[in-house]
Image (cartoon, grey):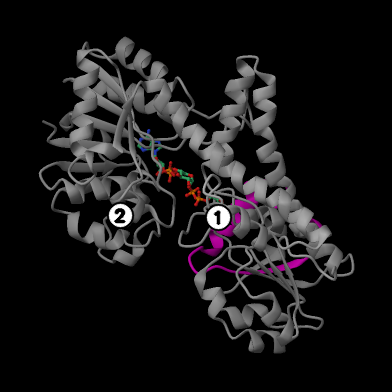
Amino acid sequence: MIKNICCIGAGYVGGPTMAVIALKNPNINVTVVDINKNRIDAWNSEDLSSLPIYEPGLDEVVAEARGRNLFFSTDVDKAITESEMIFISVNTPTKTYGKGKGMAADLKYIELCARQIAEIAKTDKIVVEKSTLPVRTSEALKSILDNTGNGVKFQILSNPEFLAEGTAISDLLSPDRVLIGGGTDEEGTNAVNALVSIYEAWVPSDKIITTNVWSSELSKLTANAFLAQRVSSINAMSELCEVTGADVNEVAKAIGMDSRIGSKFLKASVGFGGSCFQKDILNLVYIARSYGLNQVADYWEQVIIMNDYQKNRFAKKILTTLYNTVSGKKIAFLGWAFKKDTNDTRESAAIYVADALLDEQANIAVYDPKVVKEQMYNDLANLNTRKVEEIEAGISVFSEVYELCKDAHAIAILTEWDEFKEYDWKMIYENMKKPAFLFDGRNILNGENMENIGFVYNGIGISKNIE
Ligand code: UDX
Ligand code: ADP
């Protein structure tokens, strides 16, 4: 019986996942640790609106479990010592240097964790990979743990996370499935069963599937590749719609009713973002190439190429529609997060569209309900395409939409926040420069209504002036 769990990494995955595990297993102590003291302080904050990540429903779960059996701490060693089961939820960004630069996952944070666990552990541990990892990482983990440890036994499990940000709590509370990969010998099976029983506290048994470790690791990459591929596929069609007179929303509806295709993940957009899709596909491509499977690698790489193209295409459309110059023009961005209901901006399309428009000397004004100014500046600085002073000069951040859009030449919607639909668009229109251009990168507004107000409306995959 597991009595104490620890999770290394208090981020978008570790935080919500452990909060729900603690909520549903009041008899298990769950300690989430992180080396980032500010993050831990924010998790411990009295004011629940100051939690480090924004996720609908998370505050209520934390309010119930925190201090009861859910704890946040920076004392990693103590948490490792006291736990029988250790989840690793540290970040695994794409490598920015050396072999596999720009493609392979950077496993240095994982390796540091493994070494720390090996050094500290004095009793047997079950180590659970929670981060998205390339296939066969568990082998590396096992090798480090077995070769540098104190002779204690480690079982490695893969338990990939399928939660989507913005819906993390409901995804965790009622998952489509829970996947657990582990060893098939007796000790492996016992470890798998220990984790199964934690999920069985709230997930029906038939939704908990167990596999070997490799299948589990590869399933995670495959799921994200398939989902991202759907977005790139509909985005590819969006351009064809624009030139032929079709409407991508109608096409998506028509094909989505085919039960073999299904209606989800068919929303044309300015391009997918987030911490997983691009990283996981690049991983897949890298792995395939390293086995010499070039056709497989090229096939999946095209999903990324299409996504980059869609982001660029959106920026280019703004430029060409505004008479081929945005220099000195105020372009109002609605949204910066990679999707609604999150403050996460990793790989957000907004960053790349802003970068392309800064190349054209646009004055970009941004409003996002949950993303702070420093984050936007950091995101652009991390591209290494221009100096910090240029970023600060080119981007101004607003906390209110009507001021944001005042005297703007164009508005670009980058994130599908619900509140954007509720604005007084007539008032926004009246205070803009004319013609007032509106680029709806998420197709959340009714184009006809916007044109009736007076806007020149451009959605994604909606043709203009073609009968
Ligand atoms: C994804 C997976 O869904 C999740 O299972 C996995 O564990 C992590 O990666 P996430 O990145 O949080 O989750 O968000 P998701 O809802 O999948 O959206 C990813 C991106 O695709 C967003 O930028 C979103 O706006 C975009 N998207 C999604 C579209 O453009 N169109 C769609 O129809 C769906
Ligand atoms: P994810 O979306 O995968 O959860 P995040 O970047 O939000 O990614 O969270 C990962 C967290 O892991 C960060 O808060 C980071 O500080 C933490 N972390 C990274 N390495 C270690 C480590 N060796 N020990 C403890 N925490 C770590």
The picture places residue 436, in percent across and down from the top left corner, at 77, 80
Figure quadrant of residue 190: top left
Going by the image, does 113 lie left or right of 107? left
Q: Secondary structure at mark 1?
A: loop
Q: Vertical placement of 449 versus 192: above or below?
A: below
Query: What residue would you read off at disc 2?
Result: 43
Q: Which mark is residue 141?
A: none
Residue type at tag 2: Trp
Q: Nearer the viewer, residue 15 or 449?
A: 449
Measured in 3D between alpha carbons, the distance from the residue under mark 1 to the one under mark 2, in whole angstroms, is 43 Å
Query: What residue would you read off at disc 1?
Result: 257
Query: Does the stretch in magenta take in 344?
Result: no
Specify whether residue 360 is in view. Answer: no
Going by the image, does 189 lie left or right of 230? left
Label 2: few (<14), some (14–19) or many (≥20) C-alpha neighbours in 10 Å: many
Q: Which image quarter is the N terminus in?
A: top left
Residue type at tag 1: Met
Query: What segment is highlighted magenta in the picture?
Result: 358-387
> From the Cβ of disc 1, is ligand 1 less than 8 Å away?
no
Q: Which image quarter is the C terminus in?
A: bottom right
Q: Vertical placement of 97 versus 173: above or below?
A: above
Q: Vertical placement of 332 versus 230: above or below?
A: below
Q: Residue at x 42, y 21 (%)?
A: 214
The picture places residue 432, in percent across and down from the top left corner, at 73, 83
Q: Nearer the viewer, residue 447 or 91?
A: 447
The picture places residue 70, in percent across and down from the top left corner, at 19, 49
Q: Earlier in the sequence, mark 1 or mark 2?
A: 2
Query: Does the stretch in magenta take in 363?
Result: yes
Q: Residue at x 22, y 32 (%)?
A: 195
Residue furthest to the right in view is 323
The picture places residue 13, in percent across and down from the top left corner, at 38, 44
Q: Residue at x 24, y 26 (%)?
A: 192
